[in-house]
Image (spheres, rainbow, N blue to C red):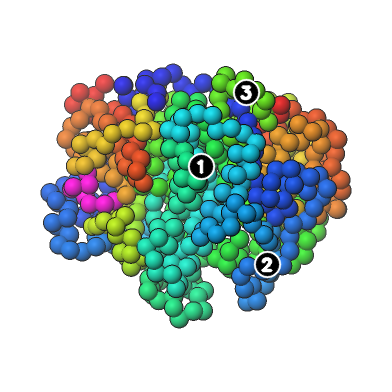
Amino acid sequence: MTSGAPPLRPEPIAILAGGVATPIGLDLDAFWSGLLAGADGLSSIERFATGDLRVGRGGEIKKLPPVALGIRSRAVALLVAAAADLRARGRLGAAAERIAVVVGTALGGVEELEQAVGDDATAHRALDALYDSPAHALAAWLDVRGPTLTVSTACASGAAALGVGADLLRDDAADLVVAGGYDVLCRFVMRGFDALRALTRERVRPFDRRRSGLLLGEAAGLVLMARERDVRGARLGRLLGHGSASDASHVAAPDPQGRGLEAAVRAALDAAGVAAADLDFVSAHGTATPLNDRIEASVLRRVLGARADGVPVNSIKGSVGHTMGAAAALEAIMCLLAARDGLIPPTVGHEEADPDCALDCVAGACRPAWPRLMLSTSLGFGGCNAALVLEGG
Amino acid sequence: MRPGVRVEGVGLLTGWGEGVAALPAEARAAAAGRAVIPLPRPALGGERFRRATRECLLGVTAVEAMLRDAGLDREAVRGERTALVFVTAAAYAASNAEFVLAGAASPAATEAGPVPNRRGSAGTLHFPYTAPSALPAEVAIEFGLTGAYVILIGGAAATVDAFWQAGGLLAAGRCERALVLAVETFEECEALWRRARWRLPGPLVEAAACALLGAGDGRPAYRARAAETALEHAAETRAGRTLSCGPLVGLALARAAGEGTVRLSGSWRGRTAAIELAIAGAAGRP
């Protein structure tokens, strides 16, 4: 609670631990080793019919961990899998009422809605269709009773969730926050992206001259956050600042000049008190659609200025697909692990540089480097843009 | 507690009509057994809104109503210095159900439908309009809002959280004005919500509401867990169940009553959040 308090302190937020469930690994260690090895988690979708779609591949999790088996909602199952991994790595050491949950999602319980308007006429299924249901199910599973918030800025949701979680801590509305994002691969979203012709029949190739589209993935990524001043032990890193901005240009396509993304990046840098010249690494949204990557590259070149050719950039969407609401949370975790281990994972699928995307794209193999200050960018339908500034160690 | 942000205008549309004057004394009695009190599709036409859903147009109309209440024109909010914080519990459900039913091969997919075409034009729903972000996107495009952008999903407690987010952006100097917008529609999925009536008792009243906030003297006093206020109870008595729009109904009631400060609360899924705001132009204005 805040009572007439001064403006938000520019206090860094400690990220104590991370937990994931992804197509390349059902825990943080497997995810990280898969990224470093350049694993490709994209495969033929088996869980639902795709025969009527142009593209039937994606980053599907083939087998859930035992802790998530038997959970009615796949969205909740993914969150529980990631939360179990998180809980094994970080202690929820605060009163239940002081632990908040903030999760981002593009799709929420839409698979439950498919079932609710189909052949499952139960009241439970109707309520599961509300997009905030999985977050509340996660809070119940964790047995925490602090504020439970759901953010849905499309594919920028994970970044926005970490930002809102940091705000809750800075405003003393919680002592610990479990924040992150999730989304499931389901017919609803496959049909939608298929109709938009956004899915590629080829390989996902972020920032590559031959890139032809994205593939979707399913995942959950969560982090445990606390105020830096409250942390005594080890941490993965810190969230220094976050920013968001609206394009106000188109419901589906990004602003052609990337003005919203640039505003979000500059807002995050400003909030963090970090100059663009001090960035050591950029985790790009990098969907591998022709338009997104060109716009994003131009924004990064404007922001990074003279250092644009020397700051390593990657995208992990060639490994796990575009995991929508989970994407930014996974990418934030990846940044912190890169800083921890001195290795930047490669951009799987990137082989031929595109002059229109003139960036120092990490490709082929992981690159030895010790990034300290890092930027993560996200864009989504509805002109949603978000950025995070992170610090390792 | 002291208010940290100032309310400069409130626009309110409900299934009962525009503004607090249209609200009945007791929504349940006025509903006369109807489960849903709908809002008509606003008469916004032209190529610009060719693909827009009813809920998108309701959002645009609520912002226009707010500007009228504040005595401002569109230029007052255009640009990067105005933040947009949108909240809804269920306004995306109609477009989601429409998209599901359009692609459903199963004859079992009939109970919630058929969902009528809710746009001005023929053709299938454009997939991006199934995202909750489509509604604030149309609002941002219409009014040229390029500032900070937050979308929360949930009922009335999430709206209080939205006021808190907006207040934080104002206090941090990240914007000069902030719009808190909430929209709820129920008509197209009435059968779905009827199944869940033990959790969502009626009457469910469609609503679209927007508040314009300006910076006050710090951050607003916010409690993530609080007790329900009499104003929250009054808003539900007058308007019915408007979910995320409930705190904005309360705010409109307080503004109409000439209150100088207001303590808003909102409850959803067992949590009540509360926030204190100042109301510009009211008696006792700080």
Say whether residue A122 is left or right of residue A283: left
Q: Residue at x 51, y 36 (%)?
A: A164
Is B256 on the left-hand or right-hand side of A185?
left
Mark 1 — residue?
A: A142
Q: Is residue B172 magenta?
A: no
| Vertical arrangement, residue B194 with respect to residue B166, above or below | below
- Mark closer to the chain start, 1 or 3: 1
Looking at the image, tell me whether mark 1 or mark 2 is earlier in sequence order.
2
Q: Quadrant of residue A270?
A: top right
Between circles 1 and 2, the one closer to the viewer is 1
**Which residue is nearer to you in this view: A209 or A333?**
A333
In this rendered view, identify the residue nearer to me: A2 or A272. A2
Q: Which residues are magenta?
A: B235-242
Q: Does label 2 or label 3 sit earlier along the sequence?
A: 2
Residue B222 in sight from this viewpoint: yes
* Secondary structure type for disc 2: loop
Numbered label attached to residue A273: 3
Rendering coords of residue A274 (x, y %): 66, 25
Q: Position of residue B279 (x, y in %)?
A: 27, 30
Q: Badges 2 and 3: C-beta atoms under 8 Å apart?
A: no
Which residue does the numbered mark 2 point to in the structure image? A45
Q: Nearer the viewer, mark 1 or mark 3?
A: 1
Mark pair 2, 3: CA separation: 44 Å
Separation of disc 1 and disc 2 at Cα?
A: 30 Å
- Tell me the amino acid under the disc marked 1: Leu
